[in-house]
Amino acid sequence: MALSTAELSLIEQRVTNDGPSTGAAYLLWFFLWFVSAHRFYLGRPGTAVLQILSYFIVIGFVWILIDAFLIPGMIREKRNEIRQQISLQMGGDQRLVGTEGGLPA
């Protein structure tokens, strides 16, 4: 069953409200990089712990710089997860909400 425009609009509103903030992610990255707070915030605790442990062998410092470019993609993935969860709760077709903006791929 396909979702109506009103239901898709509701999903996007909830994704905006419940999803991670780009600004907050970058602030956490900038100020709390040493505890990988941005990765915990974006729901990636496993890689956050690996990143913290890798600081002891210097690779983590390179990884933290690379994260500056990866944060937008991580936010997109998290928002798509939220979008799919809401769609499934509403009983809709999850294929319609697999892309940014809730439009078909």
Image: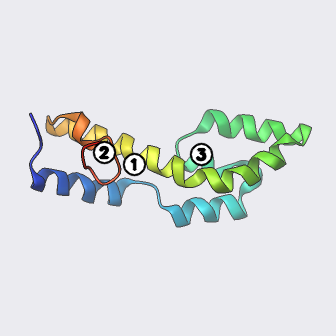
Q: Which mark is residue 40?
A: 3
| Mark 3 / mark 1, whichever is N-terminal | 3
Q: Secondary structure at mark 3?
A: helix
Identify the image quadrant of residue 58. Answer: top right
**In front: 78, or 32?**
78
> Left of 43 or right of it: where is 83?
left
Q: Residue furthest right?
A: 57
Q: Residues within 10 Å of mark 1 (few under 14, many from 20)?
A: many
Amino acid carrying mark 3 in the image: Phe
The spot of residue 50 in percent (x, y) is 73, 34
Dot 2 and dot 1 residues touching (CB under 8 Å): yes
| Mark 2 / mark 3, whichever is N-terminal | 3
Q: Secondary structure at mark 1?
A: helix
Mark 2 lies on residue: 83
Mark 1 lies on residue: 79
Q: Using the numbered discs, state the Cα–Cα distance from disc 3 to disc 1 in whole angstroms.
A: 15 Å
Whether residue 84 is situated above or below residue 10 in the rendered picture: above
